[in-house]
Image: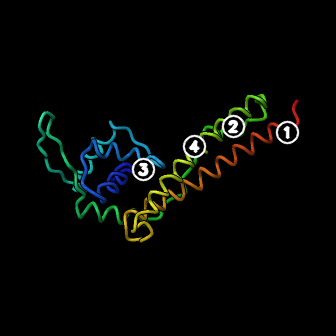
């Protein structure tokens, strides 16, 4: 059975062959918008995918550096990824520490809590600005809205990220405003 990280790696390899190092870098963007993995997790997962015949690799000799393995998704890997993409799943549970803190917000100093939410509003606004800049770059690509293109998947995920960051920032500002104008003890 393939892990979620395994499917993330297969999704990257379906776009182009990569070394483990390249996959690690690609996990920074665009995958990091919604899924993170440490560099140390990638190589063991690649070994599992290889054992399942979902990826294969070729060794590329390098000058002044150790040889590297360049991984390619197999047809079995593409089939597994294709099936996984449309298999029903449960609704994901959101685990967010700020939301958990908001649940007990009535115990906090309104001024300190307000500052916390203003800080997070700013952080989410900055993330939104970054996503919107990436969107402008993506819109320049000719295949971005063709649903059979890998770029469409990136575009769809980015649109969700933009909506999420916009909503989260607005929510943080709303909480901060309530704390500013609310009745204190």
Q: Nearer the viewer, mark 3 or mark 4?
A: 4
Question: Can residue 182 be seen by looking at this rendering?
Answer: yes
Q: Earlier in the sequence, mark 2 or mark 1?
A: 2
Q: What SS does tag 2 mark?
A: helix
Residue that mark 3 sits on? 31
Q: What SS does tag 3 mark?
A: helix
Q: Residue at (36%, 54%) from the top-left corner?
A: 7
Q: CA distance from mark 2 to mark 1?
A: 14 Å
Q: Residue at (40%, 44%) from the top-left corner?
A: 28
Q: Is residue 11 left or right of residue 63?
A: right
Q: Earlier in the sequence, mark 3 or mark 1?
A: 3
Q: Earlier in the sequence, mark 2 or mark 4?
A: 2
The quadrant of the image that shows the C terminus is top right
Q: Earlier in the sequence, mark 3 or mark 4?
A: 3
Q: CA distance from mark 3 to mark 4?
A: 18 Å
Residue that mark 2 sits on? 118
Residue that mark 4 sits on? 126
Give the total of numbered labels. Answer: 4
Q: Nearer the viewer, mark 2 or mark 4?
A: 4
Q: Is residue 71 above or below residue 112?
A: below
Q: Earlier in the sequence, mark 4 or mark 1?
A: 4
Residue that mark 1 sits on? 181
Q: Nearer the viewer, mark 2 or mark 3?
A: 2
In this orientation, which residue lies closer to the viewer: 29 or 50?
A: 29
Q: What SS does tag 4 mark?
A: helix
Q: CA distance from mark 4 to mark 1?
A: 25 Å
Are the residues flagged by discs 3 and 4 in contact, CB closer than 8 Å?
no
The quadrant of the image that shows the N terminus is bottom left
Q: Earlier in the sequence, mark 2 or mark 3?
A: 3
Q: Nearer the viewer, mark 4 or mark 1?
A: 4
Q: Residue at (33%, 42%) from the top-left corner?
A: 24
Q: Is residue 72 left or right of residue 120?
A: left
């Amino acid at each position: 059975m393939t892990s979620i990280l395994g499917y993330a790696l297969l999704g990257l390899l379906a776009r182009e062959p990569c070394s483990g190092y390249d996959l690690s870098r690609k996990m920074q963007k665009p995958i990091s918008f919604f899924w993170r993995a440490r560099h140390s997790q990638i190589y063991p997962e690649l070994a599992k995918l290889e054992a399942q015949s979902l990826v294969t690799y070729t060794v590329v000799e390098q000058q002044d550096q150790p040889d590297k393995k360049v991984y390619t998704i197999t047809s079995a890997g593409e089939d597994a990824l294709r099936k996984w993409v449309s298999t029903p799943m449960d609704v994901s549970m959101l685990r967010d520490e700020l939301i958990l803190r908001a649940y007990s917000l009535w115990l906090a100093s309104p001024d300190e809590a307000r500052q916390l939410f203003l800080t997070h509003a700013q952080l989410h606004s900055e993330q939104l600005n970054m996503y919107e800049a990436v969107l402008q770059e993506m819109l320049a690509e000719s295949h971005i809205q063709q649903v059979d293109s890998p770029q469409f998947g990136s575009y769809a995920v980015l649109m969700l990220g933009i909506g999420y960051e916009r909503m989260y920032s607005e929510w943080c500002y709303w909480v901060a405003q309530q704390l500013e104008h609310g009745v204190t003890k």
